[in-house]
Every structure is written in C-alpha cells, then in structure tokens.
Amino acid sequence: MRARGVAATTVVTVVLGVTAGVAVADETAPSRQEVREARATVRDRAGDVDAVRARLAAAGERMDRSSIAAARAAEEFNGARWRAREARSAAADARAEAAAAQAEADQQRAVVRDAVVTSYELAPEVTALAAVARSDGIDAVLQRSATMASATDALDANYDRLRTAATAADAARQRAEEARAEAVRAMDRAREAKRAARRAADLAAAETQSIAAEKADLIAELAGLQHVSVRLAQRRQAVLEVRAARRAARAARQDQAATPAPAPAPAPTPTPTPTPTPTPTPTPTPTPTPEPQPTAESTPEPTPAVEPTPEPTPEPEAQPAPPAPGAGAQAAIAFARAQLGDPYRWGAAGPNAWDCSGLTAGAWAAGGVSLPHYSVAQYEQSTPIEASELQPGDLVFWGSGGSPSSIYHVALYVGDGRIIHAPRTGRPVTEESMYAWTAPTLFARP
C-alpha cells in the first residue's frame, strides 16, 4: 500500500510538472511586430486624447468670443440708454431756458408797450409848445422839451432791450428744438441697441448650451480614451483649465509689470516776466584826459565777453497721485458681496439681477458715489490708475484695446487679485481671480 501511495504521488507530481511546464512555455515574449503595434496603439490613443483636449480648448474659446460679443452688445445698449437719458435731460434744460427767455421777451414787450402809450400821452404837448411859450415863457418850454426827450430816449432803450430779448428767445427756442430732435434720435438709437443686445444675448445663450453639450460629449470621449469614469475626466479637465488660467494670469501680470507707466507730461515752462531796466541817472561828463597813443608793436587784447549765467530749468511738476479710496469702498464691497449668487441679466441693475456695470453702479451707490449704468462712462468719471496701484473698491475694466471706448466689461476689485462681477448669461454674480477670464486692460478709482 505504501509503495502504491508513493507511486501515485510521483505520478501527480510528474503530471503537475508537465502542466506547469506547458504554461510557462506559452508565456513567450511578444514579437517585434506586436511591440510596434502596441506602441502605435498607445501613440494613437495619446493623439486622440490631445485632439479631444484641443477641441475642448477650442470650444472654450468659442464660448469666450460669444460671451464677449454679448457683453459688448449689452454695454452698447447701456451706453445708448445713458446717452438717451442725457439727451432728454439736456432737452428739458433747453426747454426751461427757452421758456425763461420767452418770459423775458414778453416782459420787455410789455415795457415797450407802456412806453409807447406814455409817448402818445406826451404827444399833445408838442402842439401846445407854442402856447406855452407865449404864456409861460421859454423856461417852461425847455423843461417840457427835456421831459419829452427823456421819454424818447427811454423808449429807444426799451426797444433795444426788447430786440435783445427777442433774439435770445429765438435762439433758445432753436436750441430747445435741436435738443428735442437729438433726444428723439438718441431714443431711436437706444431702441435699436436694445434689439441688438437681445439678439446677441439670445445667440450667446444658445451657443453656451450648444458648447456645453459639445464639451460634455468630448469629456465622455476623453474618459473612454483614458479608461476612467466621466466624473474623473470632468475633474481632470477642470484642473487643467484652472492651471491654464493660472498660467495666463501669471503671464498677464508679468506683461503688466513689464509695461512701463506713461511718463507724466512736463509742465509748461513759465515765461519769465521781463524786469524793466531802470533809467540811469545822468552824470556830468568829465573832460576827457588825452591818453597816450599805443605804439605800433603793442596791440591791446580784446576784453573777453562775459558769458550770461543760464537760468535753471524748472523741474516738471509731479502729477498728483490718485485719491485714496474712501470709506465708501468698504461699503461698495459689502454691497457687492451681498449680491453673490444673483443671476446675470443684461441691462439689469438690481435688486435681484445684475449686469456688470449695473452691479458696480449699485455697489458704489451704496458707497456714496453716483456712477452711470455704463462701463465706459464709469471709467471716464473715475481717476485712471495702474494695475500696481489697485486697492479694494477700485474698478477693473476689460476692453478690446487700450482705448476707454472699447470697454465692454467692468468688475469691482476686492483685494488680493480678486474681483466681484456679474460675468455673463448663465453665470451668477461671482467672486474670483481677476485673471480667471482674460487679462483686464484698464483700471480706475471712483
């Protein structure tokens, strides 16, 4: 029995050994062709990942362009609306001036009318002068003649004042009519700008939805290529976008730091007031004493001319520093923070929805400063500063160039490189880095 057990054990061992040997023999090294094919597959997959990421970046750029176009249209509407209000105010002022000028003309007309009546009342005395001369004497005639002359002079002066007042009234009436016509044209432009802003906003909203769906499909494709979940691919993409934004922010800060501030214009050199030369007191001329004649060999050297002392060049006056933010800056920031999460709506200025310039105008109204609901006018009514001078409460602007007229977005600076703003349709009032989008172009202090 023991012998049979040993034999059985030996057989099992041999069989297992043979089986293991077969398994080891099957794990042969891949061929060179297989390695090349595997490497090509990895390269293709990496290329596909890069292509998807490039398409994601392109989709993000399209969304930015669409948002900028909508923001520009919205601010153009804000500007047209602001100008229309200014035109209506100017027309009202012109109407008031025309009414005042007409009232003055009417008053002068009444004065002239009274003067004419008075002159007619004095007219009978002209025919009575002869009788007066015969009965009262020449002195009475002269006295009454002087009275009539004074009345005539007064009438002429009243006529002059009436002509002046009537001319002023006509000019004021013309200005009022021109101002009214300009107000009508401004209202027409504002209505057209409103229609354009609505079209741009609708287009941007549609593109945002389309691009968001496209990005979702691309991220799902990216997840399949990387053999990860869609959720993980979304997180990876978000991290990549944040890193790209940070790189862009660093580059923008470096560019702004490298850009020298414009040198202040030198102050005009004042022209010195000439000092009048005093008239010398004449002195008696002494009898000249004959001087010895110089010899032919000795030629007197000319007296060297005295060089005038140059006047010192005045130093150019230093440009005044921008005013420091007042206590209103903290109130403006507190107001803006209270609106975080409110939706964006173009043309809105609260209380439950905002656009970019509506938010900054509302914030600074809480800080005691009145700003127009228009980003370009907000810059023009503030003190321009450099990025290095930013302090909490300042305004940060985005434009398509260095000109204030190109501004299409504004935000409130809150410190540490961060802003509060109403970004665009689909994004609520947000606090984030001022470089989270594109680099700002202009800065100002209300």
Image (tube, rainbow, N blue to C red):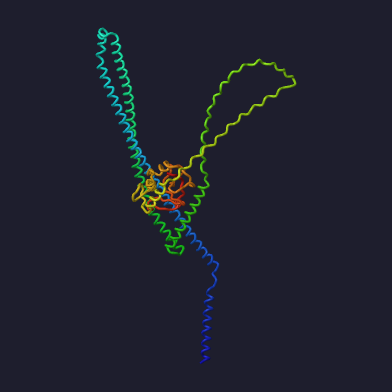
Q: Is residue 163 left or right of residue 69?
A: left
Q: Quadrant of the C terminus?
A: top left
Name which residue lies at 36% across and 40% down: 83
Return the residue nearer the eye: 279 or 364.
279
Residue 309 seen in the current view: yes
Q: Is residue 394 left or right of residue 23?
A: left
Q: Residue 411's x, y, as percent?
A: 42, 48
Q: Residue 179's x, y, as percent?
A: 34, 34
Q: Residue 6's x, y, as percent?
A: 53, 88
Q: Is residue 402 left or right of residue 340?
A: right
Eyeballing the image, is 31 above or below 328? below
Residue 76 seen in the current view: no
Return the residue nearer the eye: 112 or 373.
112
Q: Residue 307's x, y, as percent?
A: 63, 29
Residue 99 picture quarter:
top left
Return the residue nearer the eye: 342 or 269.
269
